[in-house]
Image (cartoon, grey):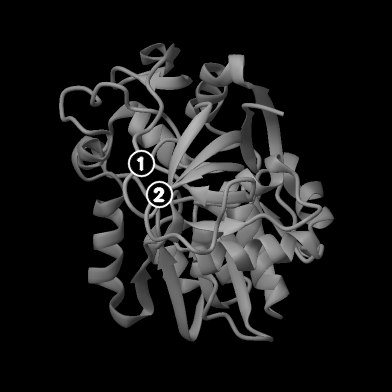
Amino acid sequence: MRALIQTAYGSPAGVALRDVPQPRLKDGDLLVRVHAAGLNAADRFLLRGEPYAVRPLAGGLRRPRAGFVVGRAVAGRVEQVRGDVHDFAPGDDVLAESPSAVGEFARVPARLAAPMPTGLSYAEAAALPVAGTTALQSVRGVRPGQRVLVTGAAGGVGSFAVQLATARGADVTAVCAGRNVAMMHALGIEHVIDYERATVADIAAFGQVFDMILDLAGNYPLAALRQALAPGGTLVLSVGTGGRWLGPARRILAGVITGGRRVRTFTARPNSADLTELASMVATGRIRPVIDRTYSFDEAASALDRIDQGRVDGKIIVKVAG
């Protein structure tokens, strides 16, 4: 089969479509013929190999393991099951997290897969794993009537988070670039801040405070974000800068140390139930994936380059088959 293989850390020059063996299944796995794969910010970290702490995920400190396939978000059709798998059978359409997404076939642990509802396209389904589950889990504690601020609202996670928080009854304020203000309004977000014109510190100075701030941009001072919290409010950190060794962990650790109980960290845990919930919400029109651009399989390396350049609005999708 063909797959997008990463052979070095540093830049998209280290990836290429190559012929590799089909994935070998373990008990509890599905073999999925990939129709679409979604790229995420995590793929950029692995491409760059920074922070260094992510390199074991690619199988090597100096270079990725041989045959390392790019991507973790996949949608396609089950070709084969192995072991004690009762929820899926050959011919089923699924969306899932996979350790090898951008290829003609992917090995998918059945516990990380969900059925694809009728009416959902493969591209829409491939947008949900990783970004969608991260957004869903990050806003799970949001209650109706709460005021929620989301920075980085136009990105892959942010574009889901603002919709999911709104669906939970929150009064959502989105922070994004000016070019994406119209997109936020189209998603049903009434309060939108152009970060190029107003800072979070400005918001706090005007008296606007929030019960929850989901910081997906990582480019505001922690003190300014804490100042914008209402009494009892929570700042949720999942990104930030910190250099080659620690990456986001340095800023997150600083936030926890200085913010105490008002600051918490967040790491998503992939699972089938959350994917099922997200897919149902898309199928019923409660939320929708924002797709920046869809690339053909032959353009897969260019799709990764687009992620590497940053400033992606929503999701990047690679159409592999069908």
Q: Quadrant of residue 151?
A: bottom right
Report helix, strand or loop for mark 2.
Answer: loop
Mark in the foreground, 1 or 2? 2
Circle 2 Cα neighbour tier, 10 Å, few/some/many (<14 / 14–19 / ≥20): some
Q: Is residue 13 visible?
A: yes
Q: Amino acid at mark 2?
A: Arg
For marks 1 and 2, the one nearer the N-term is: 1
Q: Report the residue marked by disc 1.
A: 25
Q: Amino acid at mark 1?
A: Leu
User: Where is residue 105 drawn, in percent x and y?
Assistant: 50, 31
CA gap, disc 1 and disc 2: 7 Å
Q: Quadrant of residue 48?
A: top left
User: Where is residue 14 drawn, in percent x and y?
Assistant: 36, 14
Q: Is 67 or 7 nearer to us in this picture?
A: 67
Q: Are marks 1 and 2 in contact (CB under 8 Å)?
A: yes
User: Where is residue 237 drawn, in percent x and y?
Assistant: 40, 62
Q: Is residue 198 visible?
A: no
Q: Report the residue marked by disc 2.
A: 82
Dot label at residue 247: none
Q: Residue at x 45, y 49 (%)?
A: 219
68 relative to 74 in the view: left or right: left
User: Where is residue 72 drawn, in percent x and y?
Assistant: 45, 41
Relative vertical location of residue 254 with respect to residue 95 in this rendering, above or below: below
The C terminus sits in image quarter = top right
192 relative to 303 in the view: left or right: right
Relative vertical location of residue 222 with respect to residue 140 in this rendering, above or below: above
Q: Is 90 or 252 nearer to us in this picture?
A: 90
Q: Residue at x 37, y 49 (%)?
A: 240
Name the outermost residue toward the left. Answer: 61
Q: Residue at x 25, y 21 (%)?
A: 66
Q: Residue at x 39, y 61 (%)?
A: 84
Report helix, strand or loop for mark 1.
Answer: loop
